[in-house]
Amino acid sequence: MSAGGTPPDRIDLPQEELPRRWYNVTADLPDLPPYVHPETREPLGPEAFEPLFPRECVRQEFSRERFIDIPEELRGLYLRIGRPTPIYRARRLERYLRTPARIYYKREDLSPTGSHKLNTALAQAFYAAREGLEYLTTETGAGQWGSALSLATALNGIRALVFMVRISYDQKPYRKYVMKLYGAEVVPSPSDRTQAGRRFLEEDPEHPGSLGIAISEAIEAAVADDRAKYSLGSVLHHVLLHQTVIGEEARRQMELAGEDVDVLIGCVGGGSNFAGLTFPFIREILEGRASYRVIAAEPKACPSLTQGEYRYDFGDAAGTTPLIMMYTLGHDFVPPPIHAGGLRYHGAAPTVSLLKRKGVIEAAAYPQEEVFEAARIFAMTEGLIPAPETAHAVKAAVEEALRAKREGREEVILFNYSGHGLLDLQGYAQVLGL
Ligand SMILES: Cc1ncc(COP(=O)(O)O)c(C=O)c1O
């Protein structure tokens, strides 16, 4: 508890305390299985990734150093997009639930594109620009990741080429406009720009596209041009590493507030925002210094951590990537079209998967209607409309607060508020019948 006895409703971190390094959980997971070649099953080294990603990203992917410095110039960019982000206490939600628990959330929605995705987009674009690349290619579904990379490349003086799943390109135009306003080239996928795209268009000129196809196109476009590399928004170690700026800040903020956290929560698509908040706390668990409960929230419709198998599988739907040891529903699993597009991924990051396997973290899956209902209560009480992905974390926090109430325990719950839902109102309207 803070000096005055009452923890504050808003916990800020001074700019000078913006973290100087990211935490690399792979240093504390010596039994992390390697990426392997799909045919030979031999472990793959950095050389397999170098044609694809900026050199420094590959170095970080394979680094086992516990901490990796955040370059000063990049820290400047983090300050520009609003880091350190505040933590809010959900006091009105607590009252509504009549829970003795204290609920806190980290405001990753406050970035210019409205989610945590900029934390890694800025880092990847920064390294790409420093290495003399002219542009980055990527895929995007509904556009959260694409808009983050579009802004990040613009801020670093390079460009983005974004392959956007065609059905979203046509039906969810707002983030497409955001990307274009930041100067990105946005191509509906499948497109005639790549062999992979042309193949799918020949099959069906009206093909609605999928994330798997868009990944194949973005990779092909990057490999075909020396001036470009490819960028991924989740799953890989270096992407999760960049997100740990969230948890490094949060640990310090909770310390400043005098609060000892009991339960940590994040939603999981590929696992990057969950990892971002929780890995710096999980370090203390792995070192035997703390015993938090850590909960990964996922959709019932795409339950990779709760229902998937722990095995080697492809990272993309088309089966073009190295094999990754992870909880997976199978790379050919096609999740139902739920509104939390960012959680429609068949697997989960290998580090998050291993932590689940080891029992360090738990997972919970929720049906869409209950998730949107929790989001509605959050909007009414806290005044913020969460992204449908984020709403899964809100739901888990509500469930934990109600459990604490049943058990009469004054627990401290901290969840990652990964993004706002102001461009997702159509989903709210459909599910809640607005
Ligand atoms: C707001 C928001 N939260 C969460 C996610 C899930 O991704 P990840 O698990 O990598 O954080 C996404 C992905 O698009 C997102 O946009």
Image (cartoon, grey):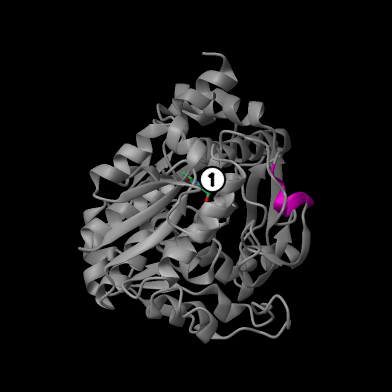
Cβ of mark 1 under 8 Å from ligand 1: the answer is: yes
Q: How far from the left and from the top, in percent, is residue 211? A: 55, 50
Viewer can see residue 8: no
The amino acid on which the numbered mark 1 sits, given as a three-letter code, is: Gly
- Residue 399 in the image: state x and y as whole percent: 66, 36
**What segment carries the magenta color?**
302-307
Picture quadrant of residue 294: bottom right
Residue displayed at 69% across by 78% down: 33
Q: Is residue 197 left or right of residue 115?
A: right
* Residue beneath the point at 38% across and 75% down: 54
For the question of whether residue 174 can be seen, the reply is yes
Q: Nearer the viewer, residue 36 or 7?
A: 36
- Residue 116 in magenta stretch: no
Q: Which residue is mark 1?
A: 342
- SS assignment for the magenta stretch, majority: helix
Q: Badge 1: few (under 14), some or many (20 or more) residues near its Cα, within 10 Å?
A: many
Q: Is residue 306 shown in magenta? A: yes
Residue 208, picture quadrant: top right
Q: Position of residue 349 (x, y in %)?
A: 61, 63
Q: Quadrant of residue 292?
A: bottom right
